[in-house]
Amino acid sequence: MQDKTVSKSLILGLSLLLGCSLLGLFIFKGLKTFSDKDRVVTVKGLAEMNMIASTATIVIDFSLSGDDLPQVIKQTDTKKNQIIAYLATVGYPKNEIMIANVDISDQEKYYEQRWEDGKQVSVKIDRYIITQKLTIETKEVKDTEDKVAQIKLDLISKDLTSNIDSIYSFPDLNSVKPKLIAESTKNARIAGEQFANDSQAKLGKIKTASQGQITIVGRYYYDNEEGSNELTEPYIQKARVVSTIVFFLE
């Protein structure tokens, strides 16, 4: 009977010892997990990508004015045809040129007030102003600026002076967004691993992550914080994103 009592006491003692050990282990792991949650590192990952324009549009426009509307229309048509004839000689046939309808502005006043020699005088102005616009779309984006400069000089030499500008169309930003985000996340992890190695720790899982606003650097867009990075090639825009990621440290 006494042996049975001793055995029961021994089993009970071992059970209590095992229970306390397991409880201590769980408490230790819980405290360690709680402590590890406070061990984090916040890093930023930068990603940049050049976007090449898919098309370029050359815009040519000019205005003529006068009081005789039919005469001004005739002059406008003549100049338009002369410009089209010239463009054909430099590789832009008529079927590739979009010709917009003329815009006719009828001035309500024939005179306007100006200051001359310290006094206000009435100056006669033309009643009608007619504006004509021609546009050319091309995929040779890298040569567009040189073409525009040459066209401008040639038209001046032919007494066909006009306003000339170039407009570039770029791929949709959403087409490069996934790759940008993946690259910024990768670069953030590289920075986090470097910090972890310096701290004799191991980089863990991501705790939180936030994607910064995608900015565009180029001729028509610029980054207010780093304006010096503006690109000189108008047919190139640089898409940039900075992601902020918080990693656990183990």
Image: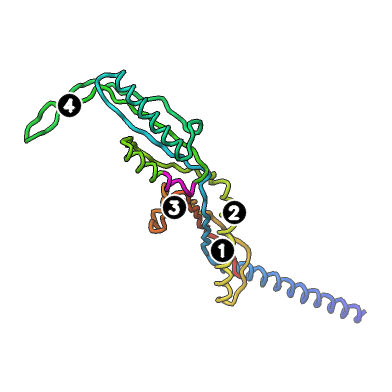
Q: Nearer the viewer, mark 3 or mark 4?
A: 3
Query: What kind of element bears circle 2?
Result: helix
Main SS class of the magenta portion in the image: helix
Q: Quadrant of the N terminus?
A: bottom right
Q: CA distance from mark 2 to mark 4?
A: 58 Å
**In the rendered structure, which amino acid carries the disc numbered 4?**
Glu
Q: CA distance from mark 4 to mark 1?
A: 63 Å
Viewed as shown, does residue 88 lie left or right of 202? Answer: left
Pinpoint residue 180: horizontal percent, then vertical percent: 56, 54
Image point (30%, 28%), residue name = 64
Which tag, 3 or 2, sits closer to the chain's start? Answer: 2
Say which residue label 4 marks: 112
Q: Nearer the viewer, mark 3 or mark 2?
A: 3
Q: CA distance from mark 2 to mark 1?
A: 12 Å
Say which residue label 1 marks: 187
Q: Nearer the viewer, residue 135 or 75?
A: 75
Say which residue label 3 marks: 233
Relative to 84, residue 105 above or below:
above
Which tag, 2 or 4, sits closer to the chain's start? Answer: 4
Viewed as shown, does residue 184 lie left or right of 149? Answer: right
Query: Which residues are drawn in magenta?
Result: 141-147
Relative to 107, residue 192 above or below:
below
Label ID, residue 179: 2
Which tag, 3 or 4, sits closer to the chain's start? Answer: 4
